[in-house]
Amino acid sequence: MSSVIVAEEISVALARDEVLLPPVSFKLETGSALAVVGPNGAGKTTLLRVLAGLMKPTSGLVTVAGASIEERNPVFRRRVAALIGMPPLARDLTVKEHLVLVATSWGTPAPHADEQSDALLASFDLTRLANRFPHELSSGQVQLFSIALTMARPFNLLLVDEPEQRLDRHRLELVTGALEAHVTAGTTLVFATHSGDLVERLANQILEVGGVDPAAGTE
Ligand SMILES: Nc1ncnc2c1ncn2[C@@H]1O[C@H](COP(=O)(O)OP(=O)(O)OP(=O)(O)O)[C@@H](O)[C@H]1O
């Protein structure tokens, strides 16, 4: 099977040798799930930002689907969906309108986008919040909504930073199930996490960044 991501000794450093990401190497095959683990400040988010094309490595080489990462390349953009920090949200669009907007802007015909949005809302237990504005959601609800929004568009490589953030057990189960279903369907997943449970449930490959996380595996 071909590798979707090949990373060879990629690192990110600022001037004066401040290291954001120490050198990491890995290969990831289509349909695999890579958990990126490590203590706070180790460089997990930085690695995801590099893979999403939001930041260039200062050394090393990385390719996605055999090509160098180029945020503006339409083929790369269609391939990769990422949730790294808060997605941009419009104050005057409802939760459902956000989902429909994203789906239609990626070419989903309007009636299908409507149905798909309803299905996404239902799968994340968000149906009753469909007509709320983003600022009317709790922090955990925003996290769920953000994950749903990330999945409202096409992708075959999904990058997610700490999907477990702010979620109760039931909602985390919904998110884990959704991620699992995508991987089963052939999506390649890279996620940064502090949850040993999530690593165990989802990952078939683990990348440790910046030393051992003493908290990993204890949740
Ligand atoms: N814009 C920036 N300027 C300078 N240093 C930064 C910047 N962004 C992040 N860093 C530093 O880079 C290092 C890696 O940060 P990163 O966010 O990748 O860590 P992380 O492993 O995701 O941490 P956490 O588990 O806390 O989310 C940290 O030391 C952080 O302070």
Image: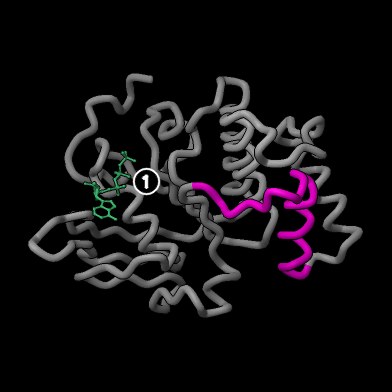
| Relative to 177, residue 208 above or below | below
Quarter of the image holding residue 214?
top left
Based on the picture, tell me whether residue 92 belongs to the magenta stretch: yes
State the residue in front, 15 or 163.
Answer: 15
Crowdedness near tag 1: few (<14), some (14–19) or many (≥20) residues, C-alpha within 10 Å: some
Identity of the residue drawn at 81% across and 51% down = 116
Based on the picture, tell me whether residue 98 belongs to the magenta stretch: yes
Quarter of the image holding residue 135?
top right
Relative placement, left or right, of 200 versus 60 is right
| Relative to 201, residue 119 above or below | below
Q: Where is residue 141 in the image (x, y as percent from the top left)?
A: 63, 32
State the residue in front, 135 or 124.
Answer: 135
Identity of the residue drawn at 79% across and 55% down = 100
Can residue 90 be seen at all in this image of the molecule?
A: yes
Q: Position of residue 48 (x, y in %)?
A: 39, 55
Say what amino acid the circle numbered 1 marks. Gln
- Residue range highlighted in magenta: 86-107
Relative placement, left or right, of 151 versus 5 is right
Identity of the residue drawn at 56% across and 59% down = 81
Disc 1 secondary structure class: strand
| Relative to 42, residue 101 above or below | below
Q: Where is residue 76 in the image (x, y as percent from the top left)?
A: 52, 73
- Number of disc labels: 1
| Relative to 44, residue 194 above or below | above
Relative placement, left or right, of 133 versus 85 is right
Identity of the residue drawn at 41% across and 65% down = 54
Relative placement, left or right, of 160 versus 141 is left
State the residue in front, 125 or 185.
Answer: 125
Colour pattern: one colour
Q: In which quarter of the image is the C terminus?
A: top left
Distance from mark 1 CB to nearest ligand 1 atom below 8 Å: no
**Residue topped by disc 1:** 205
